[in-house]
Image (cartoon, helix red, strand yellow):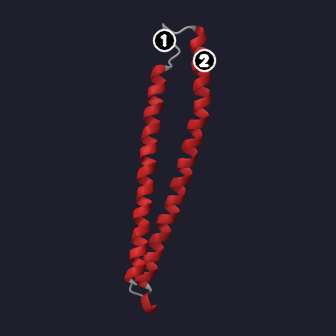
Amino acid sequence: MAREIGKQLDRLESLAYKVRTNQYLLDYLREWAETKCDLFRDDDPHMTDGEKIQNRLFLKDNFKKYMDILGQTSLDMIKFEADLMDVRQNIADQYFNKDGDNHE
């Protein structure tokens, strides 16, 4: 039983790493968005109309990429939640139902 619990704990550690990676990605996207909002304001008096149009097109293209990344991150977090609950249930089943005994 200790080996099975060890496997489940290793799986939990792997899941925690995935969450940390997603957190870094979300932090990066937030910083990216803040930077782009500051750089490409249409009210900048030094920008020509052509630059404003080019910047709007740039933001439109990148906004789709940004939304795709956020969507994938959201799906990853949903999968993480399901995996984490599966691990929790496996550990609980092994502990509480060992040899048919119910330790609740």
Q: Type of residue at label 2?
A: Gln
The secondary element bearing badge 1 is classed as loop
Tell me the residue that label 1 is attached to: 44
* Residue 1 in picture, x, y percent from top left: 40, 84
User: Looking at the picture, does residue 100 appear above or below residue 28?
Assistant: below
Residue 15: give x, y in percent of width and height. Answer: 44, 61
**Quadrant in the picture for residue 8:** bottom left
- Judged from the image, the secondary structure of the residue bearing numbered disc 2 is helix
Q: Nearer the viewer, mark 1 or mark 2?
A: 2
Nearest to the observer: residue 97 or residue 46? 46
57 shown above or below 4: above
Is residue 101 at least partly visible in the picture?
A: no
**Which of the numbered marks, if any, corresponds to residue 91?**
none
Question: Label 2: how many residues lie within 10 Å, few (<14), some (14-19) or many (20+)?
Answer: few
Q: Residue at x 46, y 80 (%)?
A: 93
Q: Residue shown at 44%/86% (left/top)?
A: 97
Q: Which residue was labeled with disc 2? A: 54
